[in-house]
Image: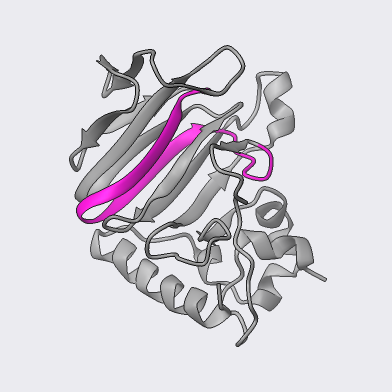
Amino acid sequence: MQRSQINEILESGDAFFRSFGYVLPPFAYWSPDQMRAPEASMIVERGMGWDITDYGQGKFDELGLFLFTVRNGDPADLGSGRGMLYAEKIMISRKDQLSPMHRHIVKAEDIINRGGGTLVLELFTSAEDGSIDREGDVSVPVDGRMRTLPAGGRLKLDPGESVTLMPGIWHAFWGEGDDVLIGEVSTVNDDRTDNVFEMPIPRFTTVEEDEPPVRLLVSDYENLD
């Protein structure tokens, strides 16, 4: 993706958040230089902040996702079972924009339709080897009540509804009818290691620097001086 495209998406995405009364924390608006300062060390280390991906395919409108990680714990605490063991994201899934089929190894997550259109999730359970089970039913909690769907069943969430996805549940999702504001509350999240995709695609986009960044993406942090 070109940096100019990313800068435009950041501006429009922030406006979309605010249209629902969702206001990001102050560090969302820090400049690249501020993100290099010592006070940003925890934000950088935990991968908090802006995240725009086209999964390396160069067609963001069709295959992509807009995210902001609001808070995130330290994955090292998971072994002790104590500490900040949770994370929170706010996301935008555009109308008919696919977030491709994937599962997580560690992360359990609540996916919440916070407003806009209908959020559609295509769901599968895992086979014993971790691959997609294309025959078995898949059961997930939807707002505290179990729902069972056939393999590849499509769960539709209207604004206010949510689903809990445990590790190993394969899922793809997109907005139907309109763009969707999505909340995510989850276990501590490490997007560098905890995403397994059906297709051989990267989690983060490759950026073509055609203009300076207005804000840094979490994928830019590894290149900080």
Residue 166 position within the rendered picture, expressed as x and y whole percent measured from the top left: 47, 22
Q: Is residue 72 above or below residue 139?
A: below
Based on the displayed image, in which of its 4 quarters is residue 211 positioned? bottom right
Whether residue 101 appears in magenta in the rendering, the answer is no
Q: Is residue 125 left or right of residue 35?
A: left
Left or right for 72, reference 114: right
Instruction: Estimate the x, y position of residue 221 in percent, counting from the top left.
Output: 71, 62
Residue that extends furthest to the front in the rendered view of this protein: 135
Which image quarter holds the N terminus? bottom right
Q: Position of residue 215 (x, y in %)?
A: 57, 74
Which residues are the magenta region? Answer: 167-193
Q: Of residues 184 and 71, which is closer to you in this image?
A: 184
Q: Residue at x 18, y 40 (%)?
A: 158
Picture residue at 32% right of the left edge, 48% below the top? 174
Residue at position x 36%, y 28% from top? Answer: 123
Q: Looking at the image, which residue sits at the far bottom?
A: 211
Q: Quadrant of residue 149?
A: top left
| Quadrant holding the C terminus | bottom right
Residue 82 pos. (x, y %): 66, 22
Q: Is residue 188 above or below residue 219?
A: above
- Residue drawn at point x = 71 percent, y = 28 percent: 77
Q: Which residue sits furthest right?
A: 225
Does the magenta-highlighted stretch encompass residue 186?
Answer: yes
Observer-nearest of 177 and 19: 177
Judged by its main secondary structure, the magenta piece is strand
Q: Is residue 95 left or right of residue 63?
A: left
Q: Is residue 122 visible?
A: yes
